[in-house]
Amino acid sequence: MATQKKIDTVTALTEKISRAKAIVLADYRGLKHKQLEELRKTLKKVDGEFAIVKNRLFLRALRQSSGQALGEKANSLESSLTDATAALLAYTDEVAPIRELLKFFKAAGVGKTKTGLLGTQVLSDIEVTRLASLPSRQVLLGRLVVQLNAPIQGLHRALNWNINRFVWALNAIQSSKVKSQN
């Protein structure tokens, strides 16, 4: 029988899941309360949220949120919703909160990721780790700008080279005429 508290919890989780760009399920066992609070503060700085969830309520919220596409993926996540589970919800940047979570788990020596969702794509534990190893958004955008600018710079150098060669040839002719007159 559903109590009002459970209904409110599912409603709140459904709203959070619908806003999240990425979700990572993690086993947080072994972390102390003070460590959890520190982790939450760290994740809040990168617009992420770390919430300890009840497995059945989270699964119900996942099925209710974002329609059919995410509801179908909920079935594949059901096997990961065992034991103690916490959910990392990344709201603006998908990678930064995941990177911070894995860095924290590594520093604490406790905790591990179970699975994740990037949009509607289900990620394994290994894929979550690989996603966290990606460079930040700003670095990737910087690399894109450099790649887009490279052909323009190449064209500029090619056109500039021909003009430079012409100027050098004129200077050589002028210096040879000056030497022949002396």
Image: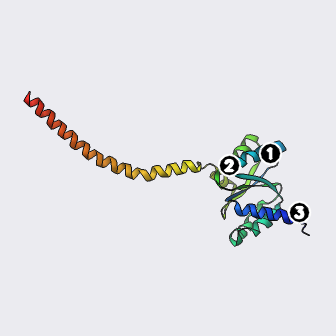
Viewer-proximal residue among 135 and 19: 19
Task: Look at the numbered discs 3 and 1 and tell me whether their residues touch, using CB distance below 8 Å.
Answer: no
Q: Is residue 2 positioned above or below 52 on the image?
A: below
Badge 1 is on which residue?
Answer: 37
Query: Where in the figure is residue 140, as x and y percent of width and height?
Result: 54, 50
Q: What amino acid is found at the position of numbered circle 2 in the picture?
A: Val
Residue at point 23% right, 43% down? 165
Badge 2 is on which residue?
Answer: 46
Gap between marks 3 and 1 measured at Cα: 23 Å
Residue at point 73% right, 40% down? 107
Q: Earlier in the sequence, mark 3 or mark 2?
A: 3
Gap between marks 2 and 1 measured at Cα: 15 Å
Badge 3 is on which residue?
Answer: 5
User: Which corner quadrant of the image does residue 86 belong to?
Assistant: bottom right
Q: Circle 3: is it few (<14), some (14-19), or many (20+) Cα within 10 Å?
A: few
Query: Where in the figure is residue 104, as x and y percent of width and height?
Result: 73, 44
Q: Earlier in the sequence, mark 3 or mark 1?
A: 3
Q: Circle 2: is it few (<14), some (14-19), or many (20+) Cα within 10 Å?
A: some
User: Which corner quadrant of the image does residue 31 belong to?
Assistant: top right
Count of numbered circles on the image = 3
Residue at point 50% right, 49% down? 143
